[in-house]
Amino acid sequence: MNSSSAIRVTGLTHHYDDRCAVNDLSFDVEVGEIFAFVGPNGGGKTTLFRVLSTLVPLQKGDAAIFGHSLRTDASEIRRQIGVVFQAPGLDHKLSVDENLRHQGHLYGLTAASLRERCDKMLSQLGLTARRGDLVEKLSGGLRRRVELAKGMLHRPRLLLLDEPSTGLDPAARNDLWTYLRQIREQEDVTVVLTTHLLEEAERADRIAILDKGNLVALDTPDALRDTVGGDAITIQTADSRQLADDIGAEFQFPVEVIDGAVRLEQPEGHRLIARIVEAFPGRVDAVTFSRPSLEDVFIDRTGHRFCQDGAPEKG
């Protein structure tokens, strides 16, 4: 295994009965990265998270964390990873401090070492003044901080987070990312997270985009945007298929119809808009112009929009 790899996955495939949740995934996560898996609900993020966190066994393919095989070294891997689940894992009837001490006991921390780690985590996450508060009295953002404190209590080398921004307001989300960068810089912790929020994935060092169980793109946010062939123009019209054909014939470049709208990508797209409107008077109802985004990358790789219905992910 590459010494710079925190995670190495080769040919990972996982089925639920006859449904393929993840299909032949291969990737590396480097030590010290903040790495994001992003995709719509049902894209395979949750299944991948469960495999990497040792909650479900490998079915097909290979995976290793810091050189330890997920097939044979799950116990050793659990000592080296911290996990923050999407679903809350706190006891709401216990205080913040009691939740942390209970977690520490599970990892064999006792006496002075446990007190020292609890104190450090509470201080690092701005929770010292709330250590005696019942969890049920805390806001969603503060509860997420307690979850992070639990996940980091035993000094893991890798922190896995499943949809960590769920239920957080923008300020709490910014606090979360400040902390993730802090532990990466100060404690050499590798951070791997799943998210269905494209704007959140933008903050990661590298992004893996999943769709229907397949890995459709993997690179830095800037490099992924650079793969899109120019500015994105979306046109609303009464007859999208006919207008797309006519624009393609007139200007001699590819034009698509996605979710009922005409879509094209061209350099200096802002100059092209006026030419299209003039060439097809009365047929353009509305035009949207944007610089390349991760949504454009997703559309370019999958042929459909990055849609969310708010339902929990099944795969």
Image: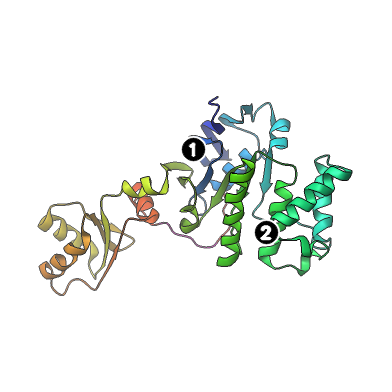
Residue 95 lies left or right of residue 208; in this view the side is right
Mark 2, secondary structure of its residue = helix
Magenta segment boundaries in residue numbering:
306-310
Q: Residues within 10 Å of mark 1 (few under 14, many from 20)?
A: some
Q: Nearer the viewer, residue 19 or 162?
A: 162
Q: Residue at x 66, y 51 (%)?
A: 85
Location of residue 129 by image quarter:
bottom right
Mark 1, secondary structure of its residue = strand
Quick check: can you spot residue 164?
no
Q: Residue at x 83, y 50 (%)?
A: 101
Q: Residues within 10 Å of mark 2 (few under 14, many from 20)?
A: many
**As displayed, is residue 90 above or below residue 156?**
below
Sequence-earlier tag: 2 or 1 = 1
Residue 68 lies left or right of residue 5; in this view the side is right
Report the amino acid beneath label 2. Answer: Arg
Residue 47 in the image: state x and y as whole percent: 58, 44
Q: Based on the picture, tell me whether residue 34 belongs to the magenta stretch.
A: no
Location of residue 185 by image quarter:
top right
Report the amino acid beneath label 1. Answer: Asn
Please state, as top left, top right, bottom left or bottom right, where the N terminus lies in the image. Answer: top right
Residue 124 in the image: state x and y as whole percent: 70, 54
- The residue pinned by badge 1 equals 23
**As displayed, is residue 163 above or below residue 288?**
above
- The mark closer to the camera, 2 or 1, is 2
Q: Nearer the viewer, residue 104 or 179?
A: 179
CA distance for labels 2 and 1: 31 Å
| Most common SS among magenta residues | loop
**As displayed, is residue 295 above or below residue 19?**
below
Quick check: can you spot residue 226?
yes
Q: Nearer the viewer, residue 297 or 222?
A: 222
Residue 139 in the image: state x and y as whole percent: 70, 68
- The residue pinned by badge 2 equals 144
